[in-house]
Amino acid sequence: MAILTALFFLASWHSLGRGGHERIAEAFRTQTLGMEIAGDRIPLQQRFNDCLITIMALEQRQPRQELFISPVNPAEPTQDVCRDLENGTGPNASAYYHNYLHGQTILLRYLLPHLELASIKAIYKGLLAMLLLASAGLCFLRVMDGSRREESLVFLVATLAFSRFFGLEWFGDSLGNGPSDLIVIGFLALLSARAGAMSTGEWIISAAVFGALTMIFELLTGGLPLGGAMVLGLGWFALKRGERSPQLVILGLVAYGLGAAIPMLTKVVLVATVFGSDALFQVALEGLNRIGSEVPPGLPELTVISQLVLHLGSLAPGMWMTAAGTLCLALALGAVALARHRSPEHLLLFASVALIFLWFALFRQHTALHASFMVRILVWPIAAGLALIALTALGANRVQPTR
């Protein structure tokens, strides 16, 4: 993971000075960028984030040895990021955005000189569709011919759950969520392709790389807990049957965590070295504010549960009742399935769901304030609950009725 981290920062260094400013006027003309759209406020938030990431990618007046570590944060002095981007108004040159690794911003620096923003967004969404279709098709084939049927059934259920209840209609082409979603769906597709065939070494390396890539593209929109839940819940079904054990699955989760930690710790060291301890202190203080407290003073009406329930429509845009009902069914019937079978794979799926709700409990303030993004990780309780039901049904079908 140290090599992958080094390659990432090397890519960040060489992403600078590539241009792409000429794409902005066309993006606003075609309304690929801009806030002037009708409809739900969640797509409007995506528009804001698109402008934010674009202006961070293009703002390069600062020294290279600073910009390759952190882009400038134009939202610090103003919330009119789209207006600033359209009018060419420069952001505060001293407001660096240290909180994340900003893989999305670096990727955009490479793509923007060669592609219109509309094309970039279409590529993100198209790749997500292709990965989901490939994963589903492979799983369907294996279920039909009986090859690794149990494993393929679990991955099929997970793939279909992500296809419907991950809000890709709104988030899939976002410059912020699109790349991070590709990491999540790409990992799911990899496990689907290698269902029941992964060796121990392949599993550990895959989990560690997944952790590193998740952190590189993470904007605290739920990628870290979702990835951890997937590793914990799907590891059993990815491994070869002769090598499976709960301990090995948990070892994969540890590898995932270490993979995520290495690039983040490297970023911390670079920020402290180049920008000083004050910058690092501000990042730590903001992180601590996301933990423990419910919401900022003056906003007592925001609670985690109420905000998550309110934003369940993010799972299936325009179909709040379908999303809420499917989540309740998956949790309730999944609990019934778990009560009937306490095998290791059932217990690991249950633990993976608990990890999601533990994250909500730990990051209460962040979840309440950003529920429209964070609610998307409830796709995993849906996937895991339906997988428990499918496993129970498959086991029941193997039992021959007495005559």
Image (cartoon, rainbow, N blue to C red):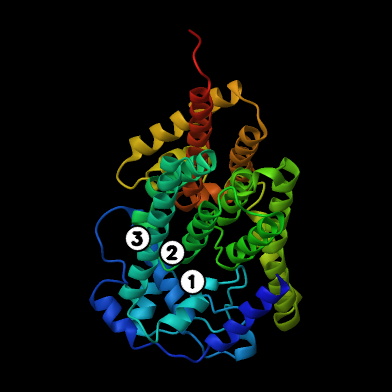
From the viewer's perspective, is residue 114 above or below residue 212?
A: below
In the foreground, 255 or 356: 255
The spot of residue 399 in percent (x, y) is: 53, 20
Report the residue marked by disc 2: 178
The quadrant of the picture occupied by the N terminus is bottom right
Report the residue marked by disc 1: 75
Q: CA distance from mark 1 to mark 3?
A: 16 Å
Q: Are marks 1 and 2 in contact (CB under 8 Å)?
A: no
Q: Mark 1 or mark 3: which comes first in sequence? A: 3
From the viewer's perspective, is residue 171 above or below residue 342?
A: below
Instruction: Please indicate whether residue 212 sits to the left or right of residue 58 in the image.
Output: right
Would you say residue 185 is visible in this rendering? yes
Binning the other alpha carbons within 10 Å of mark 2 as few (below 14), some (14 to 19) or many (20 upward) gives many
In the foreground, 360 or 384: 384
Instruction: Please indicate whether residue 204 sits to the left or right of residue 402 in the image.
Output: right
- Amino acid at dot 1: Ala
Residue visible at 41% across and 55% down in the picture = 132
**Image depth: mark 2 or mark 3 in front:** 2
Secondary structure beneath dot 3 equals: helix
Secondary structure beneath dot 2 equals: helix
Report the residue marked by disc 3: 44
Q: Mark 1 or mark 2: which comes first in sequence? A: 1
**Image depth: mark 1 or mark 3 in front:** 3
Q: CA distance from mark 1 to mark 2?
A: 21 Å
- Amino acid at dot 2: Gly
In the foreground, 298 or 236: 236
The spot of residue 315 in percent (x, y) is: 40, 46
Number of labels in the image equals 3
Q: Quadrant of residue 145?
A: top left
The spot of residue 26 in percent (x, y) is: 27, 81
